[in-house]
Image: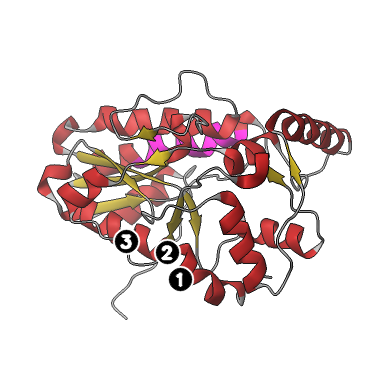
Amino acid sequence: GGIETVTGDLADEDSLTRASAGQQVVFHTAGRVGDWGGGDEFRKVNVDGTAAVIAACLRNHVRRLVHMSSLTVLGLPRHGATVDEETPVASRAGDAYTASKIAGEELVRRANGRDGLETVVVRSGVIWGPGDKTFLPRFAALLRRGKMVLVDGGRNRVALSHVENLAQGMLLAAMAPAAAGQVYHLTDGEEITAAEAFGLLAEALDLPPPRRSLSFPVACAAAALMEAWARLRRQTDPPAFTRYGVRLVASDCCYDIGKARRELGYCPTITFRQGVASLAATLP
């Protein structure tokens, strides 16, 4: 009770104006997420749609806009070093999704202070939890078919963000006065490798863990071939492996969440090790 649902569309300015009317805080979490689709599709939603949300907030004199970005804007580094909010975004986006998230985030940061609007950018890792329809169901399907392959042995650390941890962080970002104009990394704060994560997911599904591994260049080449074949066949669904997917599961760095802990009081409570078993029961 107490929640009013307003249906809208990022391409429909009137619906955004209605949804934000009379609101003090707007959370912008809508977006096109994934590793398959044309650049125009990602730009229309993640850039033009974000511009439309900002415009609606300005029209309605919203006090604060909290924008959901992604750690992908840092380019999915493989150098193993620690990165934080001072690390510059990728100078060259390797895919349409990342390019659209960089551009959308820049619009939000530039809007801070315009006509009294405060903006906050939060960047998540791979979002997981009940209801996920993007990555974990695909990984589970690959495990069930015995087709899941690690990259370079899966020794790289992966950044995960449970939806409840993320919701907590976004609420804190909405309330903290010092957050205006800032960027925050919100992950589960858990050091976990790709091999460990896929092994835990397989165990929760009562399946054997992935045994095969490909080098990063070979995995990228195989994904490029699968993408080319899928485009020839005019597939709307992504192929089993994409180059973005390979880069995502092979990314290796430590995303520092210290700023969110210090300035927001962010304290993630759910880790993949704790929560994957209950999640597995919800996967298709």
Q: Residue 211 carries which label?
A: none
Please tell me which residue lies in front, 108 or 48: 108
Q: Which amino acid does label 1 sit on?
A: Gln
Would you say the residues marked 2 and 3 are in contact, meaning their CB atoms lie under 8 Å apart? yes
Q: What residue type is labelled 2?
A: Thr
The amino acid type found where label 3 is placed reads: Pro
Position above or below: 266 against 273: above
x and y, in percent, of residue 215 in the image: 72, 34
Calculate the distance from the C-alpha at mark 1 to the C-alpha at mark 2: 5 Å
Q: Where's residue 104, x and y in %?
A: 41, 33
Secondary structure of the residue carrying tag 2 is: loop
Rendered view: 194 above or below 36: below
Picture quarter with the C terminus = bottom right
Image quadrant in which the N terminus is located: bottom left
Q: Position of 204 compared to 256: left or right?
A: right
Q: Which of 110 and 201 is in front in this view?
A: 201
Q: Is residue 214 visible?
A: yes
Extent of the magenta region:
41-53
Numbered badge on residue 274? 1
Residue sitting farthest toward the bottom: 1
Determine the residue positioned at 49% across, 42% down. Answer: 11
| Nearest to N terminus: mark 3 or mark 1 | 3
Q: Mark 2 points at which residue?
A: 271
Residue that label 3 marks: 268
